[in-house]
Image (cartoon, helix red, strand yellow):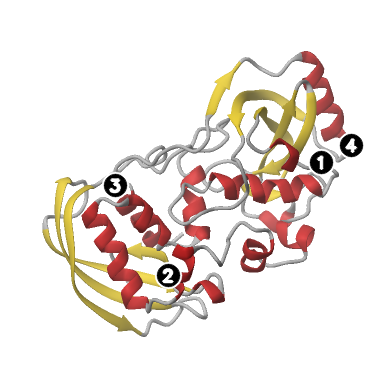
Amino acid sequence: MRLACFSLLILIAALSPAVLMTGCTPVQPATTETHHQAQELLSQYGWSINGRQATYQVTMPDSFEHRPGEFPIPIYWAYNNELSKAIGLDLSPYLGQHVKATVYELNETLPEFLLPHTKARAVVVSSNEKIIGAWIDKGRHYAFACSLDRKPLEEVTGMSWSEWLVASGVVNLENEIERELASLTPEEIIVRYYQALNDHDEERAYACVTRRSLTNALFSNMGDLALYHSSYDDGDLLREVIDSVEVMDTEPLSISGNPEGTLEYRVDIDVKYARRVISQNGHNVRFVLLEKEIEAAGWRIASIGTGP
């Protein structure tokens, strides 16, 4: 992972804590009956539990749509519901309801296509002692992995990440903010992001970032048996709190080695920190990488770093 991705989370975390749209609370371990059901289900697909587990009481989001500016919990459930549907389980009827999610550490390793990641966990979701969803994840620092029958999202849905975001309804291109952002140039997206930081407007800042980058905040630095974070603050260990920031200049760069279809800008900012960890007050330089994650949605920020 390039430094830019890490720096992006530092800057976003400078905002006030996001409003949580769902909860994730540790509770007593799954009942014996539910545990036996989970063992039986996992064994059907060649997985076995090593003994370590943690159970959480979770409030499902009201829908799988991820509106611009929200913490990406709906994306977590939408993504993993696709993996769950691959084995005949669908979480859709339980949206907005309280469910239990148990994380199990497994003895077996992840499929080869997920290398260098090898450590596998299973997440089994239940309601009233009935299993309603299950999938495999890889835990910290980015948990999305595969279905119990070892298939990635692309194989399960027959779509790329970008295609799936729209086709699944996770991204609604008719949303007013989506339409507004789609009309902006890369430079305008950068300025809008930093203006939002200056105004401490978390919704506007998060809306300028790709969904893929936002999902990093679900899992970064979480515990071995954690399910996911519930806010942008949870996984950030080095938070720099911004008092004010202004964009002084933007300059497009031509950098070899960047992914195809991306643009990179050198951005000169004048920043004042309420609390700083790495950077100093005054003039700072940031390198902003942008991409069209969804063509019709326009440019969004993929990463921000201190070097090209």
Residue type highlighted by circle 3: Leu
Give the SS element for disc 3: loop
Q: Position of residue 279 (x, y in %)?
A: 19, 54
**Residue 307 in view here:** no
> Horizontal placement of 260 versus 160: left or right?
left
**N-term mark: 2 or 3:** 3
Few, some or many C-alpha atoms within 10 Å of disc 3 (few <14, some 14-19, many ≥20)? many
Q: Position of residue 230 (x, y in %)?
A: 48, 37
**N-term mark: 4 or 1:** 4
Point out the image quarter for the C terminus. Answer: bottom left
Q: Which mark is residue 15?
A: 3
Q: CA distance from mark 4 to mark 1?
A: 14 Å
**Residue ID at (80%, 25%):** 130
Residue type highlighted by circle 1: Leu
Q: Which mark is residue 181?
A: 2
**N-term mark: 1 or 2:** 1
- Circle nearer the viewer, 2 or 3: 2
Q: CA distance from mark 1 to mark 3?
A: 38 Å
> Horizontal placement of 194 versus 222: left or right?
left
Few, some or many C-alpha atoms within 10 Å of disc 2 (few <14, some 14-19, many ≥20)? many
Q: Which residue is mark 4?
A: 44
Give the SS element for disc 2: helix
Q: Is residue 264 above or below residue 206?
A: below
